[in-house]
Image (tube, rainbow, N blue to C red):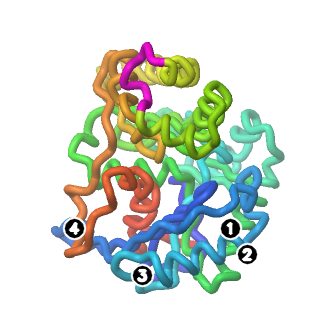
Amino acid sequence: MGIFGLNFYHDEPLFGLDIGSSSLKVMQISKAKNRPPRVIGYGLSGQYSSESIVEGVVVDPKILGEALDGVLRARLIGDITTRRVACAIPSSHTFSRPMKLPFMEKDEMAEAVRLEVEQYIPVPIDNLYLDWEITQRTPKEIELSTVAVPRKIVDSYIKFLETVGLEPVALEPTMNCLSRLFSSADSAHDVPSILLDFGSLSTDLAVFDKTMFVNSTVPTGIDNLVDMIAKKFGLTTQEARQLKNDKGIVDPHSEVAEVIKPVLDNLIKEVQKIIRYHNERTAEAQRNISQIVLGGGGSTMPGLSQYLSKALGMPARMMDPWLHLDMAGLSRPSEFDRSLFLTVAGAAVLDPKGVFA
């Protein structure tokens, strides 16, 4: 669900691309039956201006093109052997939600979903690309997960990718990529979980219970925390980032933690709302959420897992798929960088056989 197939099906390799607010990541993974996914190559670009993407729309393809060229030419570990690409787009600029419809035939669903989506998305339906996945079907009703993305965002990504000579195969929200990686390469993916993607500009949340359900965004990310620390202590942005990385929220009573806590507590309230919604919905099945799984660059902040675990009364941990990926002799990303590669790894493990126009 959430895969916007862009070309006719080809059983050919692809690589994943994650274009972040200030850096981009690439990774190619080979999958074979009865063998762990094998990493062919991966890389992280240098920093670029966050102004190259505005509200999810690529507005300066030249900057992104230079960053992509730089990582493919000089910053790769291993190789990228294909120009076919599955690209992540920011979940914070997508609209996702579960939906229930009366039982109907498949050919009737497109119009029914369209009419339902028009009621909750504050964007004209003709300005969106829409996709959905059936998560449960009974003789009386159908449960769906839906995702819609503004056409201007998708079109800007396609134009950029084609301009740099790549063949865009699929675009999908970052949280969909993360949930795919969780389901395929995390040993504890079979229990209901909250996935939390702590990014630079926002934090995305989703419930994963065999598939991804509720998806929401809190408009606060690591850059906000860094700005608040810099303002509080009169530091440069780089100094504030280093202080956040060194101190984090290990000591909840420290001066740095006092700056960070209001933002985290707002995030915790949103997580609690999602947990209540899911647990009430699945009360009969007794499928209560039992863990928080963290991803994104912000997830490495010292003390974050412990703080969330204590506040939410359940284990909180980093997603760690690396034991389930065959690095084929390549060095693993550094401990600090591993969380940065989670989304692109999720895009890279997309099965090319599952992509249709």
Rounded to the nearest whole Å, what is the CA distance between mark 2 and mark 3? 21 Å
Residue type indicated by callout 3: Ile
- Residue 265: tell me if it is visible: no
Q: Earlier in the sequence, mark 2 or mark 3?
A: 2
Pointers 1 and 4 in contact (C-beta within 8 Å): no
Chief secondary structure of the magenta portion? loop
Where disc 3 sits, the SS reads loop
Q: Amino acid at mark 1?
A: Tyr
Residue 96 higher or lower than 338, as above or below:
above
Q: CA distance from mark 2 to mark 1?
A: 13 Å
Which disc is residue 62 wearing? 2
Give the number of the disc on residue 157: 1
Indicate the amino acid at tag 4: Asp
Q: Residue at x 79, y 49 (%)?
A: 125
Dots 2, 4 in contact, CB < 8 A: no
Based on the picture, tell me whether residue 345 belongs to the magenta stretch.
Answer: no
Between 27 and 223, the one lying in front of the other is 223
Secondary element at tag 4 = loop
Q: CA distance from mark 4 to mark 3?
A: 16 Å
Magenta segment range?
A: 247-254
Percent coordinates x, y for residue 122 in the rendering: 79, 38
Gap between marks 3 and 1, in whole Å?
Answer: 20 Å
Would you say 293 lies left or right of 116 here? left
| Residue position for label 4 | 326
For the point 75% across and 57% down, which residue is it?
51
Q: Is residue 99 above or below residue 89?
A: above
